[in-house]
Amino acid sequence: MLGAAACSPAAPEAPVYPPESLSQDPQAPEPVEIPEAVAATRDEMLGYAKRGSLSGLSRLARENEGFVSNLGGQDHRAYWDLMRRIGVDPNRQLRALMELPVGVREVDGVKWYVWPDLAAKNAEDLIPEKLSFRDRKRLQDLVGDDGIEEIRAGKGYPGMRTAITEDGRWVYFVLGQDAEE
């Protein structure tokens, strides 16, 4: 009798399922809710950009202490005017940038709202293999092969970006690697 029990088939094991994250379609991240002060500054920037007013944008930039528009320290208006003359219209670029998702980054205890959201990531989290397929494609479209190379070399987001602090201070609007070179 004992021998027959030992030869009987084992009970079937429960099937092994992949982790829930692999068995579901990728979910879009929750949209970032921006504070009223950030929305007010964004709307003012966009108002100038839609009218094509580099004067308005540069006046707003001067009103925000420490604002950065270029890596050379050139006057904002002069720099943006130069960019427009060589075919990179800051007004058009800013409008396009503000259509992208926003991300949040904390700098010295202050929340910064950064466009595009990928520019809010730390350099080590921006490596394409660490991103979802969707974000990897977006990163490729935004910064191209040269930008991906810079990211792999440990540099931060190299493309066009802008940021506003939680209290509504416009921190920077840089056009990125193509315009900065």
Image (spheres, grey):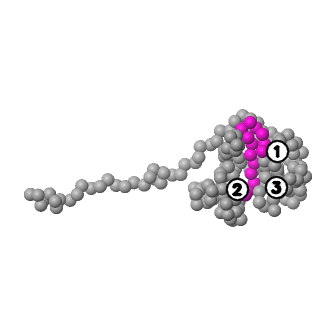
Q: CA distance from mark 2 to mark 3?
A: 14 Å
Q: Which residue is mark 3?
A: 71
Q: Quadrant of residue 143?
A: bottom right
The answer to whether mark 2 and mark 1 are in CB contact below 8 A is: no
Amino acid under disc 2: Tyr
Nearer the N terminus, badge 3 or badge 1? 1
- The quarter of the picture where the N terminus appears is bottom left
Q: What's the amino acid at mark 3?
A: Leu
Side of 104 where 130 appears, left or right: left
Q: Nearer the viewer, residue 128 or 68?
A: 68
Residue, far front: 108
Q: Does 22 appear in magenta?
A: no
Number of numbered discs visible in the structure rendering: 3
Seen at 82% across and 44% down, the residue is 66
**SS class of the residue under badge 2?**
loop
Residue 90 image point, x, y percent: 82, 52
Q: Position of residue 8 (x, y in %)?
A: 17, 59
Q: Which residue is mark 1?
A: 66
Q: Position of residue 115 (x, y in %)?
A: 71, 48
